[in-house]
Image: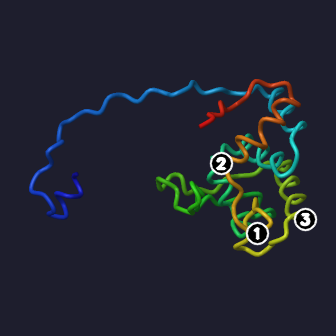
Amino acid sequence: MGTAVNWEYISNNPVRGVRMPERTLKRPHRFLSAEEVQRLIASSKEPTRTIIILATTTGLRIGEILALRWGRVDLLRRTLLVEETWYKGHFGTPKTRASRREVPLAPAVVRELKEHYLRSTDHSPRGLVFATPQGVPLAADNLRKKSFPPSENRANLRPLYKVRHS
């Protein structure tokens, strides 16, 4: 509404001063112990395994991981650049300036990414690190609903996500 006032679509902001109720979590956050992470990694198949390693060691969000391109991964300097996200079938920019960042990579992560690179088909700078055979990003919902549950079962872990059936 403030933008509508600035752009002179409306003369004043009718919701100025209105306070939004505090947001509550739909479900509490669940954190894995180091031992649980190790079991989950050991029980996962590729590319889920490498995605889990990257997520747990860097704190990257799934949309940031799925939008990651080889041109933004510097294995020699052991860093990657977060400049893009993938959400509901569309590429976008991170929400905030702080979300665009350079992320350091541990030597073990660099080794895993080198092995993943060798398994990848598109090594171009624009090539996605985690892509389908057609070159499009993996679907986060498929990872959550189809890839993670078997890994969780093999690792003897409670489900990380509660899958809703429609």
**Residue assigned mark 3:** 118
Relative to residue 154, is residue 51 drawn left or right?
left
**Residue assigned mark 2:** 62
Residue 28 drawn at (x, y percent): 57, 24
Relative to residue 97, is residue 69 drawn left or right?
right
* Secondary structure category for the residue under label 3: helix
Label located before the other in sequence (3 or 1): 3
**Residue assigned mark 1:** 134
User: How far apart in space, not on screen, are marks 2 and 3 (Cα)?
Assistant: 22 Å
Q: Nearer the viewer, mark 3 or mark 1?
A: 1
Q: Residue at x 85, y 63 (%)?
A: 117
Relative to residue 68, is residue 112 drawn left or right?
right
Q: Residue at x 79, y 43 (%)?
A: 147
Residue 24 drawn at (x, y percent): 44, 26
Label located before the other in sequence (1 or 2): 2
- The image quadrant where one finds the C terminus is top right
Q: Which residue is drawn at 58% across and 62% down?
A: 83
